[in-house]
Each structure stands twice: as C-alpha cells, then as structure tokens.
Image (cartoon, helix red, strand yellow):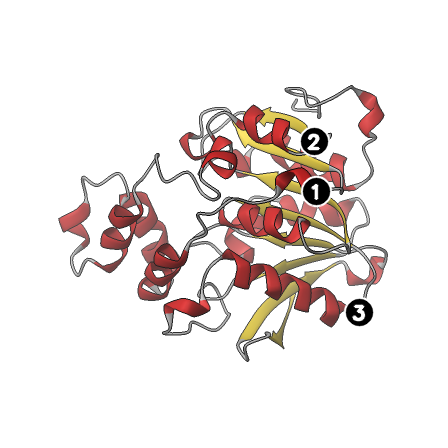
Amino acid sequence: MNDTRTFTSHDGLDIAYRVWGEQHGGVPVVLHHGFVADGIVNWAAPGVVDALVATGRHVVAIDARGHGASAKPTDVTAYGEPNMSRDVSTLIDELGVDEVDLVGYSMGAIVTAITLTREPRVRRAVIAGVGAGVVELGGLDTRAVAPELVAAALTAEDPAEIAASPAAPFRELADAIGADRHALARQVHAAHQAPIALDTITAPVLVLAGRDDPLAARPEVLAAAIPEARLTVVDGDHATAVGEPAFARAITWWVNGADLADAPGAARDTAPAT
C-alpha cells in the first residue's frame, strides 16, 4: 500500500511523491519516472517497487512537475530537467535524510544525471532508458523521435490525425493514463539539450538499457563517459524493458551494494540479467 504525500518546490509548486516500506528505515531509494508516466506507471505497475521493498528498502517515487499528481504549471519556463533536479533535492530535504539512492528512467535518467553533478547526498544511482544521446545531445535522444512531432501528437485535437506519427505512442500513453497533454507538451519544449558534466560524477552509477530501445541507443557510450560506471543491457524496448524481471533485479542488485570491484571498468551485462 503506498502513501501519497506532497511538498512545496523551490518555486512554490506542489510536488507529489509516494512512499512504500518506510518501516524498513535506512537509505531511501528515490525513483524518478520517465516522460508522460508517473511513479505508479513507471515503477509500481512493472514490479520495481515490490522488488525493492522485498529486499527491505524504503522506496520513494516522485511525480515530476507536469506529471501524475504534481502541479502542472502553464509557464513553460517552470519545466525542464534542471527544475526537476531541484525538486529531487527538495524531496531529500523533505525526507530529512543524509543520503539517498537515486534511480531515473528516460526523462528521469536525465534528471538523475544532472542531480549527480550537483547533489552530494546521492550515494548510488541508476541511469536507465537512455544512451549516447545524453553524451552527444545533453538529453533525451531527439534523433529517435523529433520533439516537434511529440508536441504535435500530444496537442492534436483528434488522435486519428497523428496515428501514423512515430510519436503516436506518447499520445496513446498519455490518453491511457489521463495525463495532462498540454503540460506534457510544455515539458517537450523545455527538455534539456545542453552538455552535462558527466565526468564530474563521483557516485557509483549503473547504466541500464533495453537492447531494442531506440531512445537508449549505444548505452556503452554513456557508461564510458561516467567515471567507473557499469553497464547492463536487458531485453526489451523503451516501453517493455521496465517490465522485464531482469530490469528490477539489476536495480535491486545495484542499490543494495553491488561492488564495483566485481568486474573492471564499464562492461556490458555486468549485472545479473537472467
């Protein structure tokens, strides 16, 4: 059973988060979802939350601004992954803890990467559902699906108009979960596309990607750009990898203290994927 709470962001927005396994105490695992989704869709429904709680972890899943139960501002400047990263820091303040383990998927992976460059309270991290685009573009890989197509798919009055668009799955998910499509379009316009100082990251990082995910192409490039990062590839594409049992196993393996000395450098399939 999850417990939904809110805190006030640095710019006055109400940001929602959900809590499981609080009775376990210890270092919380903070989960940041991907674009369109929320904490339930991205983390609870595929079983990641249950997997972590089963290992005795206190789990916290944030709903990003513009998503889920959080505020949906009308000003596009209120969006963007740097603002979401500040929300993560405020959440850590709210939790009143000295350390967290941070896991981000897709958009949440960009938030996680930015947070790792500026937030010393992250003990370990998983950057999932992204690849070389983080290094080469400074954000989600817009070469896979153009942002203008995503914004058009989200704001079209009739979804039949964009049925053939490569961005149609974003609209389908938004409609399926009742998301605010116009808030999501604002995030598209504000999405981060600037260099991230990946070489300054000091926390242990696992890069986790689906082998057939076009939005996480060449994840080995990302792993190589982060000091001593490790790489694991599981089955699935951008939508299905999170539901693979190996995905949840890799996350729990990593945040529960997998030792970097297990294998040298950044290597493919270094976490259990079976």
Residue that mark 3 sits on: 96
Which of the marked residues, 3 or 2, is nearer the chain's N terminus?
3
Q: Work out whether residue 70 or residue 19 is closer to the camera in this orientation and state it.
A: 70
Q: Residues within 10 Å of mark 2 (few under 14, many from 20)?
A: many
Three-letter code for the amino acid on which mark 2 is drawn: Ala
Mark 1 and mark 2 residues within 8 Å of each other at the beta carbon:
yes
Query: Cα distance, mark 1 to mark 3?
Result: 23 Å
Three-letter code for the amino acid on which mark 3 is drawn: Gly
Residue that mark 2 sits on: 229
Say which residue appears at 80% left-offset and 44% top-offset: 55
Could you say whether the residue bearing mark 2 is in a helix, strand or loop?
loop
Say which residue appears at 76% left-offset and 46% top-offset: 54
Three-letter code for the amino acid on which mark 1 is drawn: Ile
- Circle on res. 201: 1
The C terminus appears in which quarter of the rendering? top right
In front: label 3 or label 2:
2
